[in-house]
Amino acid sequence: MAMMWVEKHRPRTVGDIRGQAATVERLAVYGKNGIFPHLLFAGPPGTGKTTAALALCRDVFGDNYSDNILEMNASDERKLESIRTKVKQFARTRTLGGADFKVIFLDEADALTSDAQGALRRIMEQYAETCRFILSCNYSSKIIEPIQSRCAVFRFRPLADDQVRRQITTVAAAENVDLDEDACEAIVHVSLGDLRRAITALQVSASLNSHVTRALIYETTATAPPEELHGYLLACREDGFHPARRRLRTILDSFGLAGTDLVNQLHRTLYDADFLTEAQKLDLTETMAEIDFRLVEGGGEALQLDSLTASICSSLSSN
């Protein structure tokens, strides 16, 4: 089976990580010195948290780093029993290869229950001399304060467009993919600073055609191009409810969008719509927020999207 490009092109050392310059600089010092405190990596998905953890361990322990690291996904093993047994058992065993300490990497640590986090705090205290913890999470606010106070906290932010663009171009060249320039820009647009999502989008498209076009990117990522969404908003303003509704249905069918996806993409595109006034954008944002809430709470998709179209038509015609 072909290897996922996300794993194939994952940086092996801290110095190879793209973006997160301040974080990389501090972690590089840890890697050079061969020692670090407990660490907490917080930030959105696809911004390099797991990559940074594994690269740091490789810098400290060398290629045999896996002998002294336990990697767990806390969303799969989130209960108290997993912490008391698996984590504690690994923490109390001896290191291999003359290493000074072992590392336990808990990915998605914000999924741990409160009881599990309490047990984890006690293990961090008990084995602080021989074991280091690296925790990654999307929301640091879900990690209890006693754990946060024992960690050096690093904030990971969505990658800048130029950093995503540079990495996508590098991967495409390495994989002999003919990537159109506007297709690269489409990947940057749909990734929202998530490099994992960007590389996956490139691989999925390349698996269908070695010549990756803009249209193929939007098709395989279930994302509507901005001009289609702008056309829908214009139809709401100029053509009325029924033409706008037909246009919306065409977008949903053509790109396979769920209702919440449509609302989120429309909201993002809203602020690039130069034909709307600031007041109109504010009104539409409130409308989209309400529709999104109803959809998440289980409201019927067809009815809610018709309500969205009716509200937009009414708002734009009255302004």
Image (spheres, rainbow, N blue to C red):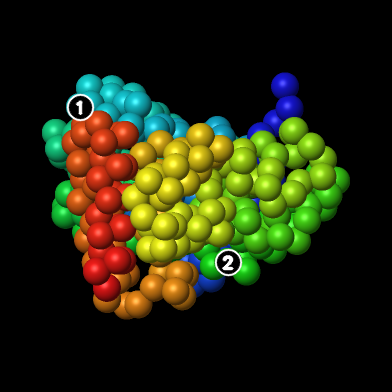
* Label 1 environment density (alpha carbons within 10 Å; few <14, some 14–19, many ≥20): some
Residue 125, position in %: x, y?
22, 46
Q: Earlier in the sequence, mark 1 or mark 2?
A: 1
Residue in the foreground of this view, choosing between 79 and 267: 267
**Vertical comparison of 151 with 62: above or below:** below
Q: Quadrant of residue 71?
A: top left
Residue in the foreground of this view, choosing between 138 and 114: 138
Can residue 9 be seen by looking at this rendering?
yes
Question: What amino acid does circle 1 point to?
Answer: Leu
Question: What amino acid does circle 2 point to?
Answer: Asp
Q: Quadrant of residue 156?
A: bottom left
Judge from the rendering whether residue 199 lies leftward or rightward of residue 75; answer left or right. right
Can residue 29 be seen by looking at this rendering?
no
Number of the label disc, if any, that sits on residue 93: none
Judge from the rendering whether residue 142 lies leftward or rightward of residue 182; answer left or right. left
Give the CA distance from mark 1 to mark 2: 40 Å
Per the image, the residue denoted by label 2 is 161
Number of the label disc, if any, that sits on residue 80: 1
Question: In which quadrant of the rendered image does the C terminus lie?
Answer: bottom left
Residue 271, position in %: x, y?
41, 69
